[in-house]
Structures are given as C-alpha cells and as structure tokens.
Image (cartoon, rainbow, N blue to C red):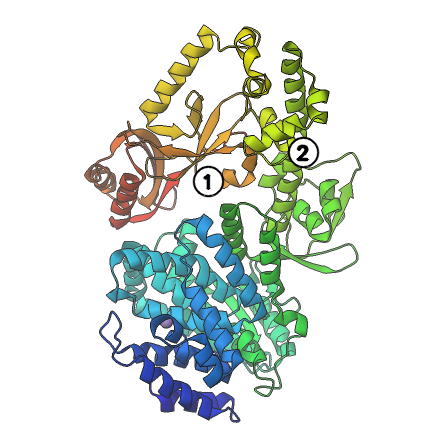
Amino acid sequence: MKLQDIIAAVQEYYPEADIEAIRKAYAFMRLHHEGQTRASGEPYVSHLTEVAALATKLRLDVPSIVTALLHDTVEDTDVTLDDLKRDFGADVAQLVDGVTKLNQINFSSRVEAQAESFRKMLLAMARDIRVLLVKLCDRVHNMRTLEFLSEARQTRIAQETLDIYAPLAHRLGIHWMKSELEDSAFRYLKPEIYEKVKQFVSQKRNERERYAEEVTKLIERELEQNGIHGEVTGRPKHFYSIYRKMERFGSSFEEIHDLIAFRVMVPTTMECYAALGAMHAAWKPVPGRFKDYIAMPKPNHYQSLHTTVIGPYGHRIEIQIRTREMHEIAESGIAAHWLYKSADKKIRMPSHDDLQFSWLRELVESGKMLRDPVEFMSLVKEDLFSNEVYVFSPKGDVVALSAGASPIDFAYHIHSELGHRCTGARANGQQVPLNYRLRNGDTVEIITSQAQTPHRDWLSMVQTSKAKQRIRAWLKSEERNRSITLGKELLQKDLRKVKMSYERLLKEGELERLGLEMGIKDLDQLLAEIGYGKISTTQIVARLLPDDQKFQTNAVVEQPSELRKIFQRAAKATQERAGIRVSGMDGMVFHFARCCEPLPGDELVGYITRGRGVTIHNRSCTQTLSFDPQRIVDVSWGDKKTTHRRIRIRVSALDRVGILAAMTQAIAAAGANIASANVSSTLDGKAMNIFELAVDSAEQLEHVIRGLEKLDGVVRVERERRKGDRI
Ligand code: MN
C-alpha cells in the first residue's frame, strides 16, 4: 500500500476530500518514525500506511485518515499533542490523543486498575466514535501481524480482541471486521481447535461448493418464477462462528450444509418481502427462525430479513434477504456512512440521536453507579456480547432488551418503581412467571403490588445491566439498614453491661470519634460493621472504657471462652492446611464456594456469610457480582504448597475407539489424578465424559484442558460448575 493508493481510495468515496492534509500527514509520519521497525522487521511506516488503508475501507473522513497515519506519533516519537494541534488542527490532535489513551489500557491486566480508564475511554468514544474506528483499524493490522510477538503477548492481545474489540466492531455493525478479529483471535487462543475447524472446512470444500451452487440455482429459479430480480450467493461462515455453533448445539463436524449461509440481494424493500414469500412458499419455514430486521432494525442499524427453511434433502437452509444499501450497512457499519452526507443519498441517514450511540451511553451511565470495578467490567462484557430481543409495551412502543430478558428486565427498563413492585406479568394477554424469557414480538404487561419488594432471586432472572444494578442497589441498602439496626441493638446491650449509656455517648460524640479513630467515616457505618460482624462490640466497649476500669471490667466484658479458643485454634489450623490467608481474621471458619471451586493460583475473594463463616470464591465467579462490598474480605493463597483440590471437567468428544484412553493419558501427562470418570454416549455418535480430578493449581488445570483440546475427536472441554452457594 502506498500513499497514492490511499488517496485514490479516499477520492473514490469522497471526491472533494482535502488530499493535501493526507499528503502532509504522510510526510510528517515518515519523518518522525524514520528508522523505526516493527517486530516483523518491516519499517514502522508500513503499519501506519496499512492502518490508514483500512480506514479508507471503512470510508472514514479525512481527519480520521490523518489520525490513522499519525496515531502512534505521540506514543512512539517525540512529537507532542501541541505539535499536532499546530500542524493538523485541534480535531486531529484530539483524535490522536484518544487513540493513544486507548493504547495505554491493558484490558486483561488487573481489572480494578483498568476499569476506571476503560470507563473514561467509553465516555470519550461516546463523544467521538472516530477514535474507536481508528483503533479498530489499528487492531486489525496488529492481529494480522501477531505472529511476530511472543506467545504471552499473543495470548493477551488475542483475548482482549475477543473480549472487547470484536464485540465493539459487532455493535458498530462492521461485519467483516468482527469476523476477521474473531477468527484471528480464535487462531491464537485455541490453536488446536482452530486447525481442526480449518481442516474440516477445506476438506469438504468441493462437496460444499457443489451443494452451495445447487441451492443457489434452486433459490434463483424460485425468485425468477415469481418475477423477482435477485442476486443469490452462498458463502461459508467464518471459522469462529462455526466453532461457536458447534459449541452451542454440540454438533460434530459432519454437517456441511450448516457451514453455509445464503444471501438474496434485491433492488427494493418491497421485493425483500416478496422474496421471503417465495422462499416460504417453496420450502417449509422453521418456526421461530424468522426475523424481520427491516421493520425493526438492530440498534446498529442492521436491516435484513432472516429465515431458515427446510430445503432440498431435508437440510436446513439459512437465508438472509436484503437490498444493496442494507448490505453495505451490514458490512461496513453505519458509522462509515454518517461521516459523509454526500456519499450516498439512498441510504437512510440516522438521526442525531442515533449518532450518540445510546447503547454506549447507557453502558457508561450504568457503570457510573457501580463502586466495584470488577462488576463494571463484567457488565460491560455482558452488554457487548448480548443480542437483542424486541418486545412491545401495552401502548405499542418497541423496547429492545438483551436476549433472554425477563418481564423484570422489561419492568426496570420502563421505570425503577415498576421494577421494584412487579409481582407478575402477562405476555400477549397470557399470565407468565417472572422468570419467563421474553420472545420477539411479545406484548408485555406488568402486574404490580405496593407490598412487593425486590428479591435476591431476581438477580438470576434478569439479563440487562440496568435491572441488575437497580436490584442490587435496593438489596444493598436494605441489608445495610438491617445491619445498622442489629449493630445498634448489640452495642446498646453490651454497653448496659458495663453501665454505660448509648444515648449519652452518642450525644457527646464519643461514638463518632471512636469510629474516626478506627478509620470509619460515620456512625451508621460503625453500627453496620458491628451488625455484619466485622467489628465486635467487645472491641468497642474496651476502647470506650477509661483505662482504670479496664482491668476490673474484664470480667464483665465477655472473654473468649475456653471452648471458643479451641474452636479458633482449629479454624486457624484448617486455614493453614488449605493454604489460604483470610486477612485480619485468623480464627474465621471458611469454606470454598461450590459454584466456582477456586484453585491455587486463582484470585480469591472472601465473603462473610451469616453464621457460616467466610465463603471463598474465585474472583471471576459471577456470584461475586451480587455481593455486598461491606461484607467482602481479602483472601489470598498462602506460601505453602497446598493439598490437591477436587474439580470436575466435562469433555465432549466424538465416540471413537481409543478416545477414552487418549483422554486419560492426556490428563496424566499434565500431572493430574483422576478420582472418577463417568462416560456416556449420545445418539448422535458423541461421547460425554465427566472426569473428577485432583489438581493442585489453576495452572495445572489449564495444562489438562489444553492437552485434551489437542486430541483428535475432542470437541469441547469445560470445567463443570455446580450450582452457586446461597449467600
Ligand atoms: Mn498502531
């Protein structure tokens, strides 16, 4: 790619473009990156030119192309933002600044440290989406040249691409970019499985092409007979989507017709519906698979009709029907088009509101109210991945919610009060339970009662971050109020024993002063901590007593009994044996959470339960999302080598001779012991294997999983989690 090619590409979609600015930026970056090379050995300028070329593919405006050329100057050369402002204007300087800041965020490193910068980045993006578009181009080129980096960096960058950038490309509606990013990340993250999928797709190439050609002809004939002029294509799906589909439906590599999606392109919207009618008349549609994204476009402006029919040979055929304009938006995303009002008059221009990318704003706003960064990041990831379901309010308004949303999500979407008070719902006039999964087109009506309040169980029934966050906030304040009341009662009782008056201490400000001494910001907080059991009343009373009384009151203020001492010693010994450290709570009983069964090496989080000591969870466990931060304690693995921990993994594989032996060998090779194995065959020729293993670290488990994934015939390996502990 040369400067000339970039200019030609820009002029093609934007003849009036200010070419001089691009020339100037090109010369500027050549000068400043002079002599720098990339890990591949290529001169650094090649990276910048490629990124700019990708930006033209998205049909970005001139400041964005200039930014693509200059995006690494501030980070990697001695050029300053002021230099850029002077030479290229404030717009470009701001864009480069945005991309530079994005580069400094390392998404997979410690979440707490990064969540705040990620939040800032989202805010910046919500203001100017071009920052993200240039960053995406940068990421595409970095992924194309990833092979030159160390394995550790490959994994980190690939994971970040899959977690953050591919979903962002999807939300922006840039289909080719999403597919490319997913496939390249897949290649580095699961190399063995990637190779298997790739081999399978290429082995079946001839067969697949014959099938695609035949079905294409059949569809064309149907269109023709109905007087519709359409263009039909059958294209293979990208590797990662094939893998995901296999994972979801547990299908093996046998069914080639599932690898192809057919697309019908027609001149007008009316003809889209006519073509759909022709397809459904010729072949039986699969119920529940028809989606009208023309009447109800996705939030990223994607429009098409989707259907699945039972085609020739009884195979399912997936068909998308759209116009050329819809196709362009589906491929490049709407962002590419709003930058140029002159580019194409036929495309429905989004309104001002659309340009604000409301989903992005909502994401940022829901994050603002969360104190816990871990929780924030997991909400962001969930939101990026979720697909939508469209339902109607009783007034006929369309409401878009995450797929799998329940009536509770719907209620919170309308109003917090409606959410808090909802007792039931009707979908299309029929009474449905609160955990009902909304379906496209449902008309939803919420039944409320003034006596109703949110339940903890609701957290497992909702999908949207808004509902989760509102329910959690309500539960937290409720729980805190209860703890304050309890703390106050406990303290009053123990103060009475030493003949002190709670009311008088309160009036004299003694309690608040004591709280401050202990680093607690106000009285309510102090009482809450007593209520939770983090601080004992004994501690408080001892601090409040005048020194000369301390000795004589020892008898009054409860001393740990002999029995309690023995109990504490036992608890401490158990902690030591299991190799963990619970900060500030040596004598605390604990147990490992069954939902996530943390392994040595995992990051831990402890939660003070009511009457059952501390439950220890894996930091990434979804249960931790509903935790009250007040009751969280720090837990870490001690230095001692620990005993083995039992965990279960589930392996689905093709049912072939020798596979079980190969699996047990792979497990042994990683140094893990098999405690028990349970193997069953399914009707479609697969074997489902559940192994109970004794492993000594998260790292060892990772070795086991990688070893199994390498085996021929293994489709999927996952850790089996049991149902969560109650809190
Ligand atoms: Mn770069």
Please name whichever residue, 121 or 337, is drawn nearer the observer in this view of the structure: 121
Q: Which residue is mark 1?
A: 621
Where is ligand 1, by quadrant? Answer: bottom left
SS class, disc 2: helix
Relative vertical location of residue 376 with respect to residue 624 in this rendering, above or below: below
Relative vertical location of residue 714 with respect to residue 174 in this rendering, above or below: above
Work out which residue is located at the far front of the displayed protein and give it.
Answer: 548
From the viewer's perspective, is 31 left or right of 85? Answer: left
Q: Quadrant of the N terminus?
A: bottom left
Q: Amino acid at mark 1?
A: Cys
- Residue 88 is situated, as x and y percent measured from the top left of the image, at 47, 84
- Residue 28 is situated, as x and y percent measured from the top left of the image, at 37, 85
Q: Residue at x 31, y 56 (%)?
A: 155
Can residue 316 be seen at all in this image of the molecule? no
- Residue 198 is situated, as x and y percent measured from the top left of the image, at 30, 62
Please name whichever residue, 477 or 386, is drawn nearer the observer in this view of the structure: 477
Q: Which mark is residue 360?
A: none
Label 2 CB less than 8 angstroms from ligand 1: no
Q: Which mark is residue 478?
A: 2
Please name whichever residue, 358 or 239, is drawn nearer the observer in this view of the structure: 358
Can residue 27 be seen at all in this image of the molecule? yes
| N-term mark: 2 or 1 | 2
SS class, disc 1: loop
Q: Residues within 10 Å of mark 2 (few under 14, many from 20)?
A: few
Q: CA–CA distance between discs 2 and 1?
A: 24 Å
